[in-house]
Image (cartoon, helix red, strand yellow):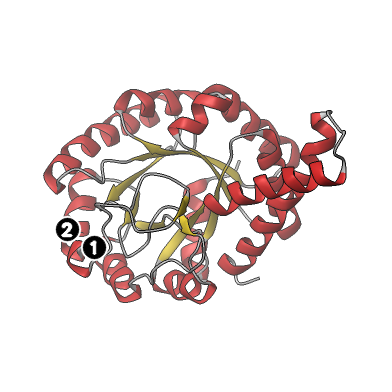
């Protein structure tokens, strides 16, 4: 029986991070699993509300569970960026290992009140069903999509005065009871087409880790420099999210397959190239996060 809570504790003790990789189809899933098996590390699969609507909530839960059981690997499923209690309930009841309730655009007080409702539901569900679903909260706005950027979107917390404050993070964790926290530390969703993303605030991560004791999650990992990852993990990050890079790899794989076989119309003969490109990106990131 694999436990996400135990794997997070091991990662913290070893000063490494779990890679969190989003999927929209089976090709992406196969590429991520192949990299996880090759590197023998735990991996998290993420599906946002939009991704879940496409692949199916219970369907993706069954896919992850059956693969975990068959291959005996620590593979975990997260309901990424969920904006309502109803969608949280749907994911928990389907068998997800973690849920992220995202009210990062709200005021601190509103965020606390809404997140408390989610935590109360999940804790009651865990007690009644013998499960251990973890709850992640988000404090600060880092954007809403894994896309290619030409400028920083309006409203994103990128200025020092807008980033998550350690004292606010401590209050947020204490009053909500969340297990995991995604702070705004200079990170943004998406990545720039021709430049690295802005630097993240390493000392702020260190201060938030000390103030909260929660497992810290770095969203918007695509586009961050490798050295920044290593410093962030050493400062207290336990999970790193990657999505935009995978979407680019998906498109690159499709293009390569169609260029090589322009007359091919059989999906299962085209999509292995997609899985291979995604596996390559996941493999590179796993080695960074796990210091392999």
Quick one: label 1, few (<14), some, or many (20+) residues within 10 Å? many
Q: Which of the 4 image quarters holds residue 287?
A: bottom right
- Which of the 4 image quarters holds residue 117? top left
Residue 142 image point, x, y percent: 33, 53
Percent position of residue 60, x then y = 59, 29
Q: In the rendered structure, find residue 168 and report the number of the disc placed on it.
A: 2
Say whether residue 41 is left or right of residue 185: right
Q: Between tags 2 and 1, which lies in front?
A: 1
- Residue sitting at 26 percent across and 58 percent down? 157
Residue at (30%, 48%) from the top-left corner? 138
Residue nearest the observer in this picture, 230 or 223: 223
Read off the residue under disc 1: 163
Numbered disc 2: secondary structure:
helix
Q: Secondary structure at mark 1?
A: loop
Where is 138 relative to 50, above or below? below
- In the image, residue 228 sits, relative to residue 265, either above or below, namely below
As displayed, is residue 275 above or below residue 61? Answer: below
How crowded pointer 2 is (Cα within 10 Å; few <14, some 14-19, many 20+) is rated as some
Q: Residue at x 81, y 37 (%)?
A: 270
């Amino acid at each position: 029986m694999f436990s996400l809570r135990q794997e997070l504790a091991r990662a913290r003790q070893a000063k490494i991070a779990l890679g969190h990789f989003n999927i929209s189809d089976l090709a992406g899933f196969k590429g991520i699993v192949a990299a996880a098996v090759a590197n023998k590390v735990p991996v998290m699969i993420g599906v946002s509300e939009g991704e879940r609507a496409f692949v199916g909530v219970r369907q993706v839960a069954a896919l992850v569970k059956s693969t975990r059981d068959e291959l005996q690997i620590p593979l975990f499923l997260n309901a990424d960026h969920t904006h309502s209690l109803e969608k949280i309930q749907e994911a928990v009841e389907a068998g997800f290992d973690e849920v992220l309730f995202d009210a990062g655009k709200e005021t601190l007080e509103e965020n606390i009140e809404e997140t408390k409702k989610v935590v109360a539901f999940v804790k009651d569900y865990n007690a009644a069903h013998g499960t251990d679903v973890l709850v992640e909260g988000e404090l600060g706005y880092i954007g809403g999509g894994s896309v290619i950027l030409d400028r920083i979107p309006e409203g994103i917390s990128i200025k020092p005065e807008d980033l998550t404050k350690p004292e606010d993070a401590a209050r947020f964790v204490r009053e909500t009871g969340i297990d995991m926290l995604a702070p705004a530390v200079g990170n943004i969703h998406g990545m720039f087409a021709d430049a690295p993303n802005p630097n993240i605030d390493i000392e702020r991560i260190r201060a938030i880790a000390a103030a909260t004791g929660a497992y810290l999650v770095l969203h918007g990992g695509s586009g961050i420099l490798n050295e920044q990852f290593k410093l962030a993990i050493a400062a207290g990050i336990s999970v790193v999210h990657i999505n935009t890079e995978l979407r680019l790899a998906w498109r690159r794989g499709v293009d390569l397959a169609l260029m090589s076989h322009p007359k091919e119309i059989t999906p299962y003969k085209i999509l292995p190239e997609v899985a291979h490109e995604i596996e390559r990106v996941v493999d590179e990131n796993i080695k960074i996060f796990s210091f392999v």
